[in-house]
């Protein structure tokens, strides 16, 4: 009576159950994978003893509160157009009472929603007399697009476009989680689309150094279940290595042209992650030829300290997988998508949002 | 010539009279009817249904409709959801200074056409003009009166455990048509809004003596909002089967691209019906040929909606919180 | 962390800025991509080898990778749309 997909899923669930001989704890890094898992109820199909911890792969969640504050400040400036992906528009800054970018728009700020960074070029051309600032967030999947925007902006000699950057990289976050005291993660599902750009070499280093398996996985329920099965098989066999289970899309070497574009525009710097602290070589900064596109320099934005005094949000613990959203006393009460205390409750990839939306 | 609405058009003087005479009379069934402050109507026997709604959609025109067709059809449909034949409508317009006259003419023509297809007569109205920047082009408020023809109360409180849930057609077309217009999505072939009158379907169900415990049209917030409202109002648990929910492939693919959920997108020509199991067959016989589907059932439990996935797992179905925004993550 | 969707390249064009030099800089190479009925303009700056008819994964308007197999194999790996076809 079932569909081909449900039959395939049942078969995978059964194989998983048959493979697991002891408890294992795995982490899916990517927030999109977290949502897919909870939305499909895949966690209900896992054999007892197989625990899934949700990782920090939500670029919205890890964007520093200070960056949001800076965006809010820029959006309030008369004549300035602040453009952003939809994902960022409902995220509170360091002070939830100060509102988000959508509320800034309601108060008269010119906030525009983009689905691609290249739309910022059209905006800058259409409004030569106004400053256009693009809030550029994302992991390695999104960095090539921002890099392309920077290259094109320079080539077009646009002098009214700048970037407010908060780009981060996945491997340092995985490293931080593995090396954190009390870490229980024994294997990873790695984000397939990040790997489509970066390839698997950094993951191979991680796997070798820490002797744990990493499976590059897609985002559909069947692909996720397949990824979980691969990971458990590696753990049971005691063979910690990287398996690319998303070979339809991911080449082991990634996308060299995209990597070159990113290298040309950005350099690695230490970066503060909201909730995770400062991680070395985990962020991207514009190289000197592109400094003129840096909104922080153009608007002389200070480096405010990363602190959210008095905010009971435990997003850091959630992002590291040390606490589950339902462990948070504010979950579903003081903290809901309509009035979030932090980013994971409003981000489409946040673990708190996933639990709130889908968990009965 | 770029004729457009001026403040004086709302001033009550000659210009306003001209606006009504030239542009708005076609809204009224009898164009020669003298427009008094109030319309006098024959009082039909039985219960009356009364509904009102305001329409503020952007963009004003989109594939398959416009704010005018929405305003007429939406209120007529609210009456139909109470089991009432829609009869009379009022139309109140708030026009922004600078609204092109050509656009107004198109919207008025659209309202007149929608009124005809809904079988309603526009009996009275009002027009005001606000300064440039104080209105989004045009705001429309319609109120409607209908006569209740359902011999039973159609109300969330009538819903019982064991009831079955049907949807009258595929989900999310209207919401997608709006999103496509707003975000410049090129859909081939274009997806048109599903804006359509619902009374004809309700009338057929009543004529076939299908007992309906509750009807709810799907508007903002889509299927998720409609079901949540009913489940919470009645304090029962609704379960729907994901694989039974009809979604056009173009809608599904566009949702994938923009990061939307079709179950959250608005509809303007679809409803859910909750009815006793013994009437399921006759209801489906009428609705299935038009795209209707049996999607779930009602049971004892907390007032919430559960979605059963094709994998046999269950998860919550809750309405979207706030504005739907395209996402990249 | 990234909504990326597969689509097929319908046409390829080159849109350099006015007055730019000779030579087709891949930076300005764009494609019209079809995602099961939805069409979007997509940059091919990161996929200089992509050709008409190729299937690509697209994220924020940029094609990031060629999708190797055919649609049948993809359906087998990913599954079909989770709802009913009307």
Image (cartoon, coloured by chain):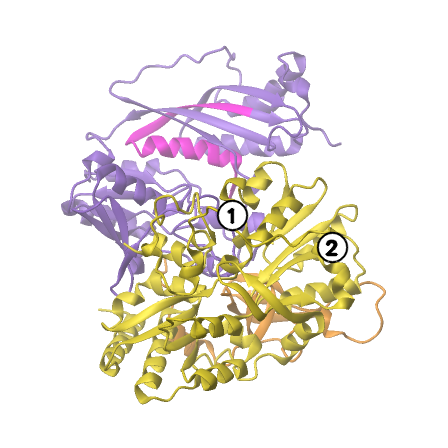
Chain colours: A yellow, B purple, C orange
Q: Position of residue B275 (x, y in %)?
A: 20, 43
* Pointer 2 or 1: first along the chain: 1
Horizontally, residue B38 falls left or right of residue C24, namely left
The image quadrant that residue B309 belongs to is: bottom left
Residue A123 is inside the magenta segment: no
Which contiguous range is marked in magenta? B64-93
Image quadrant in which the N terminus of chain B is located = top right
Which label sits on residue A231?
none
Query: Considering depth in this image, is B35 or A163 the residue closer to the camera?
Result: A163
Residue B97 lies, with reference to residue A51, above or below; the image says above
Q: Which residue in the protein does label 2 denote? A: A161
The answer to whether residue B258 is visible is no
Residue B91 is inside the magenta segment: yes
Secondary structure of the residue carrying tag 1 is: loop
Please say if the residues under marks 2 and 1 sit with CB atoms less than 8 Å apart: no
Q: Position of residue A14 (x, y in %)?
A: 23, 77
Q: Position of residue C55 (x, y in %)?
A: 54, 75
Secondary structure of the residue carrying tag 2 is: strand
Q: Residue at x 50, y 30 (%)?
A: B112
Horizontally, residue B19 falls left or right of residue A277, namely right
Which label sits on residue A92?
1
Horizontally, residue A356 falls left or right of residue A171, namely left
Report whether mark 2 lies on the same chain as mark 1: yes
């Amino acid at each position: 009576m079932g569909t081909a997909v449900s039959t395939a899923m049942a078969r995978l669930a059964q194989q998983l159950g048959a493979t697991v001989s002891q408890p294992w704890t795995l982490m899916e890094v990517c927030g999109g994978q977290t949502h897919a898992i909870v939305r499909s109820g895949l966690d209900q199909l896992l054999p007892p003893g197989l625990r899934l911890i949700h990782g920090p792969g939500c670029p919205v969640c890890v964007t520093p509160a200070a960056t949001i504050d800076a965006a809010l400040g820029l959006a309030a400036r008369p004549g300035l157009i602040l453009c952003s992906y939809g994902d960022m528009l409902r995220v509170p800054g360091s002070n939830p009472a100060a509102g988000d970018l959508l509320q800034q728009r309601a108060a008269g700020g010119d906030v525009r929603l983009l689905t691609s960074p290249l739309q910022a070029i059209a905006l800058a051309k259409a409004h030569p007399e106004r400053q256009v600032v693009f809030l550029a967030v994302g992991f390695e999947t999104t960095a090539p697009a921002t890099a392309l925007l920077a290259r094109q902006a320079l080539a077009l000699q646009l002098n009214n476009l700048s970037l407010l950057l908060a780009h981060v990289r996945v491997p340092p976050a995985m490293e931080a989680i593995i090396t954190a005291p009390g870490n229980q993660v024994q294997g990873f599902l790695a984000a397939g689309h990040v790997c489509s750009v970066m390839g698997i070499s950094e993951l191979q280093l991680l796997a070798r150094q820490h002797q744990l398996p990493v499976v590059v996985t897609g985002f559909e329920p069947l692909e996720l279940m397949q990824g979980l099965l691969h990971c458990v098989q590696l753990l049971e066999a005691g063979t910690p290595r990287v398996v690319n289970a998303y070979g339809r899309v991911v080449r082991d070497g990634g996308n060299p042209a995209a990597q070159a574009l990113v290298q040309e525009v950005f350099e690695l710097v230490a970066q503060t992650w909201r909730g995770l602290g400062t991680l070395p070589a985990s962020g991207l900064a514009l190289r000197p030829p592109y400094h003129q596109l840096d909104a922080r320099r153009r608007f002389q934005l200070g480096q405010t300290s990363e602190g959210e005094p008095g905010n009971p949000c435990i997003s850091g613990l959630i992002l590291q997988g040390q606490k589950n959203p339902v462990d948070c006393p504010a979950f579903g009460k003081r903290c809901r998508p309509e009035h979030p205390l932090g980013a994971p409750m409003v981000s489409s990839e946040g673990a708190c949002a996933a639990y709130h939306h889908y968990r009965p | 010539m770029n004729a457009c609405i001026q403040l004086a058009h709302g001033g009550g003087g000659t210009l306003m009279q001209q606006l009504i005479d030239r542009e708005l009379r076609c809204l009224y069934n009898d164009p020669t009817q003298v427009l008094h402050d109030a319309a006098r109507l024959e009082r039909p026997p039985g219960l009356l249904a009364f509904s009102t709604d305001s329409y503020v959609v952007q963009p004003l025109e989109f594939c398959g409709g416009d704010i005018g067709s929405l305003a007429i059809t939406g209120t007529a449909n609210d009456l139909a959801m109470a089991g009432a034949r829609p009869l009379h409508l009022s139309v109140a317009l708030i026009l922004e200074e600078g609204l092109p006259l050509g656009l107004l003419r198109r919207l008025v023509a659209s309202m007149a056409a929608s009124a005809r297809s809904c079988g309603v007569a526009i009996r009275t109205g009002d027009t005001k003009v606000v300064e440039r920047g104080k209105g989004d082009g045009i705001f429309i408020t319609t109120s409607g009166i209908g006569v209740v023809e359902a011999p039973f109360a159609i109300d969330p409180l009538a819903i019982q455990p064991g009831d079955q849930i049907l949807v009258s057609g595929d989900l999310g077309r209207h919401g997608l048509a709006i999103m496509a217009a707003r975000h410049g999505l090129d859909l081939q072939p274009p997806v048109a809004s599903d804006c359509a009158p619902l009374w004809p379907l309700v009338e057929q169900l009543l004529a076939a003596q299908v007992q309906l415990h509750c009807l709810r049209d799907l508007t903002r917030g889509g299927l998720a909002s409609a079901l949540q409202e009913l489940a919470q109002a009645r304090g029962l648990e609704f379960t729907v089967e994901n694989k039974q929910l009809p979604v056009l492939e173009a809608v599904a693919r566009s949702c994938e691209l923009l990061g939307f959920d079709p179950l959250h997108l608005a509809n303007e020509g679809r409803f859910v019906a909750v009815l006793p199991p013994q009437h399921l067959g006759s209801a489906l016989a009428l609705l299935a040929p038009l795209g209707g589907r049996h999607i779930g059932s009602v049971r004892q439990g907390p007032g919430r909606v559960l979605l059963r996935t094709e994998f046999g797992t269950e998860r919550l179905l809750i309405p979207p919180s706030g504005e739907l925004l395209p996402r990249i993550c | 962390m990234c909504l990326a969707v597969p689509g097929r390249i319908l046409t390829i064009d080159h849109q350099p800025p006015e007055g730019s030099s000779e030579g087709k800089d891949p930076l300005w190479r764009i494609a019209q991509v079809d995602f099961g009925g939805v069409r979007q303009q997509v940059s091919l700056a990161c996929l200089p080898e992509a050709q008409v008819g190729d299937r690509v994964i697209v994220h924020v308007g940029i094609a990031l990778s060629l999708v190797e197999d055919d649609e049948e194999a993809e359906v087998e790996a990913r599954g079909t749309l989770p709802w009913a076809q009307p």
